[in-house]
Amino acid sequence: MTTPTQPSFGLDPDTKIRCSDWTRAASLSPIGTSGSYAGYLLVEIPLPWPRDAGDTAEGAALAPLIGPLRYRLQAIVPAEPEADPAERRVILHARRPGEAGFSGYRRFSCRAGDSLTLAVAALIAAAAGDAPSELESPAVDVLVCTHGTRDSCCGRRGAQLALELAEPGRLAGQNLWRTSHMGGHRFAPTFLVLPEGTVWGYADTDLVTRVVRRAGDFADVAWQYRGCPGLGSPQVQALEAEVLRRVGWSLLDRQRTGSFEGINALLTWQEDGRMVTWGGEVRPGRTLPSPGCLAPLSASGKSETEWAVTAVRERFLLLSRLTC
């Protein structure tokens, strides 16, 4: 009996390959790979970073504070080095307390001062309430993964992208950061836009500027969308991508709630006095080998499964109105 061979998509299975070269050759879909987080804590931590940002002294000190809250730590440095850096910056993007749906994170920031843990505790306390806070600081943060000690694809492709984006006028008015691993290095270059909460792969300067400006048709860049970390499952993220193809960028400003059961995913939001619900069937799609970076495909012991979304449909439910 013949053992079936793995698809190689024109690549030599016995030659060491980069993981991002493999996913591009295979046209592997990145949707559903963003992870799901209640928030992101961005901390300026000097380079070089270890393989895991949590292994830094800062990460170890902050883990008891942010772990129970499901906040993800991202080490950051400015994409363009500053001549005279001030005290390290700390930025928290967090969901509103008790929020059922998701329409983006709230952004809080401060300088670390003499105690990083006290600064982070202050941001967490501010995010825990609905009241306005002097620490709330609306702005857009664009994070490009350049974590070469974690994966060489991010160190090579991500670092080059960050350099190109740092050119004067490219992302005027936005905060551009180099950041530590955020998952999905096989889709390098990858980037994250906060506070809207969108994660992307297969990036170039054109994609980043289009996403930040919400320019053009979302359907044109949907194949590079990894998902929204404010939504609770990869299946709902996969459905959201299909709805975004049809509805467009404005969906990202809606208070979206999602659910998944069996094969059925739902995405709901309120619009113009009515509750809009989209549904679809989400099943596992292709399963392909997932080689380690700079390892031969034939030695891969891991695999990755794409999500396939079908029967996407729209439903409308009128909201009941109370009259006095």
Image (cartoon, grey):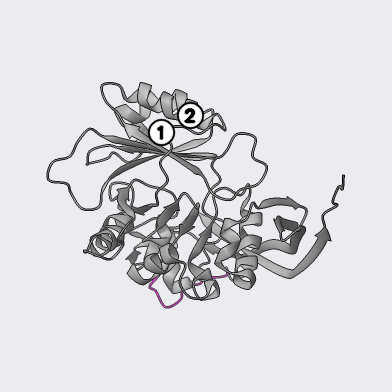
Residue 10 belongs to magenta span = yes
Q: Residue at x 37, y 21 (%)?
A: 118
Residue nearest the viewer, comparing 90 with 172: 172
- Give the side of residue 244 with respect to residue 44, left or right: right
Q: Residues within 10 Å of mark 2 (few under 14, many from 20)?
A: some
Q: Residue at x 46, y 32 (%)?
A: 133
Q: Which of the 4 image quadrants contains residue 87?
A: top left
Real-space Cα distance between discs 2 and 1?
Answer: 7 Å
Q: Which of the 4 image quadrants contains residue 108?
A: top left
Residue where numbered disc 1 is placed? 135
Q: Residue at x 54, y 64 (%)?
A: 288
Q: From the viewer's perspective, is residue 13 above or below residue 319? A: below
Residue where numbered disc 2 is placed? 126
Q: Amino acid at mark 2?
A: Ala
Q: Position of residue 253 (x, y in %)?
A: 57, 57
Residue nearest the viewer, comparing 291 with 312: 312
Q: Residue at x 34, y 65 (%)?
A: 17
- Give the side of residue 18 with respect to residue 303, left or right: left
Residue found farthest to the bottom: 10
Residue 57 seen in render: yes
Q: Residues within 10 Å of mark 1 (few under 14, many from 20)?
A: some
Q: Position of residue 274 (x, y in %)?
A: 77, 59
Asked if the residue under mark 1 is in contact with the one under mark 2, i.e. CB atoms within 8 Å, the reply is yes
Q: From the viewer's perspective, is residue 286 above or below residue 35? A: below
- Give the side of residue 263 with respect to residue 200, left or right: right
Q: Amino acid at mark 1?
A: Leu
Residue found farthest to the front: 324
Q: Secondary structure at mark 2?
A: helix
Quadrant showing the N terminus: bottom right
- Decide which of tag 2 and tag 1 comes sooner along the chain: 2
Q: Which residues are magenta?
A: 4-12
Residue nearest the viewer, comparing 148 with 115: 115
